[in-house]
Image: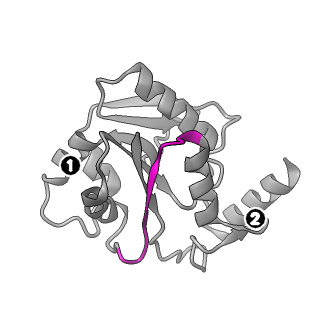
Amino acid sequence: MTDWLILAGGAGSRLGQDKAATSINGRTLLDRARATIDSVDEEATIHILDQAYPGGPAAAVVAGLARCESAYVGVLAVDMPFAADALVHVLSAVAGQPAADAWVPVDGAGRQQWLCAVYRSSALATAAESCEEWSGRSFAFLVSQLACVDVPIDDSVSLLDVDTPDDLRRARERTTNG
């Protein structure tokens, strides 16, 4: 049903280590991302965009689109170990509002999480054509012209992304305490 692009090529400079290989309770963030997608989309085709896709998330997704054949493309950053509940809401919104170009979770503070979302493949491909060079461009710039459905995510659903050692500590505590 959906191609999924797992963004796993970041340098992890703020974390101080390779994010994809970082372990939480014996499972790497990459393994957790795969399991997240498997849990929400049984027919998913998963593509790992690792260091072979340099230039940041926008450049990686634009390059990764060539591997996708589905009408929809899900994007998940490898550093979001608790994204499954948010993606359940996003996929429900896709089914309920099929005329949009993107379905993006939005937390209680109004922050959109572009790297945990689903996009119409054709709309994303058209957006990708708007620029010749995506290396170093922001992901928000890539998707800024898309017709987006904001999918409200309540505070009980974690959109924590593991960017720093403190984030990693919080993620490990969350898995230990619940």
Q: Position of residue 26 (x, y in %)?
A: 77, 69
Foreground disc of the pair 2, 1: 1
State the residue lying farthest toward the right.
Answer: 177
The quarter of the rendered structure image containing the N terminus is top left
Residue span colored magenta: 40-52
Tag of residue 34: none
* Mark 1 crowd level (few <14, some 14–19, many ≥20, 10 Å Cα): some
State the residue lying farthest toward the front.
Answer: 43
Q: Position of residue 67 (x, y in %)?
A: 30, 59
Instruction: Give the alpha-carbon distance from disc 2 to disc 1, as whole Å.
Output: 37 Å
- Looking at numbered disc 1 in the image, what kind of residue is underneath it? Ala
Q: Is residue 80 visible?
A: no
Q: Residue at x 33, y 50 (%)?
A: 140
User: Residue tagged by mark 1?
Assistant: 125
Q: Residue at x 47, y 47 (%)?
A: 44
- Kindly indicate the quadrant of the structure image that contains residue 100: top left
Residue 18 in the image: above or below residue 41: below
User: Residue tagged by mark 2?
Assistant: 169
Q: Position of residue 147 (x, y in %)?
A: 27, 31
Q: Would residue 45 be counted in the magenta stretch?
A: yes
Q: Would residue 137 be counted in the magenta stretch?
A: no
Q: Residue at x 57, y 34 (%)?
A: 88
Mark 2 or mark 1, earlier in chain: 1
Q: Position of residue 14 (x, y in %)?
A: 56, 73
Judge left or right: residue 9 versus residue 165.
Answer: left
| Label 2 element class | helix
* Mark 2 crowd level (few <14, some 14–19, many ≥20, 10 Å Cα): few
Q: Residue at x 70, y 65 (%)?
A: 168
- Looking at numbered disc 2 in the image, what kind of residue is underneath it? Arg
Judge left or right: residue 134 versus residue 60.
Answer: left
| Label 1 element class | helix
Q: How many marks?
A: 2
